[in-house]
């Protein structure tokens, strides 16, 4: 599994945790820990998405040649 696949798997797993965190927060809107978990998960997902963007941007573009 390459780096991009690993990041995508982490994103999928984090999205599951995010949905659970959102449900927990809706049930417990006054809970500090529910709010903290939701915010932390949202931030972690945003970090993963940025990391995926960077990894994709670093891929060699198709059609480009280093034989200039």
Image: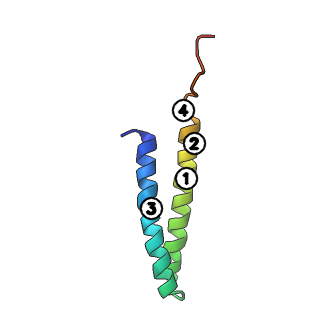
Identify which residue is drawn at 60% across, 21% down. 64
Determine the residue positioned at 42% across, 44% down: 5
Q: Which residue is mark 4?
A: 59
Q: Which residue is mark 1?
A: 49
- Marks 2 and 1, how far apart in space? 9 Å
Identify the disc placed on residue 54: 2
State the residue lying farthest toward the front: 63
Q: Of helix, strand and loop, which one carries label 4?
A: loop
Q: Earlier in the sequence, mark 4 or mark 3?
A: 3
Front residue (pair 18, 32): 18
| Mark 1: few/some/many CA within 10 Å (<14, 14-19, 20+) | some
Neighbourhood count class around disc 2 (C-alpha, 10 Å): few under 14, some 14–19, many 20 upward: few
Asked whether residue 33 is in view, the answer is no
Which numbered disc flags the more N-terminal residue, 4 or 2? 2
Where residue 14 is drawn, which disc sits there? 3
What x and y, as percent, mark residue 36? 52, 75
Q: CA distance from mark 2 to mark 3?
A: 18 Å
Mark 3 neighbour density, 10 Å: few (under 14) some (14–19) many (20 or more) = some
Upstream in sequence: badge 2 or badge 3: 3
Sequence order check, earlier mark of 1 and 3: 3
């Amino acid at each position: 599994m390459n780096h991009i696949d690993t990041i995508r798997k982490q994103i999928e797993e984090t999205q599951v945790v995010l949905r659970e965190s959102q449900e927990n927060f809706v049930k417990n809107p006054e809970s500090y820990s529910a709010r903290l978990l939701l915010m932390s998960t949202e931030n972690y997902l945003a970090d993963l998405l940025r990391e995926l963007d960077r990894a994709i941007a670093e891929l060699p573009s198709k059609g480009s040649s280093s034989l200039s």
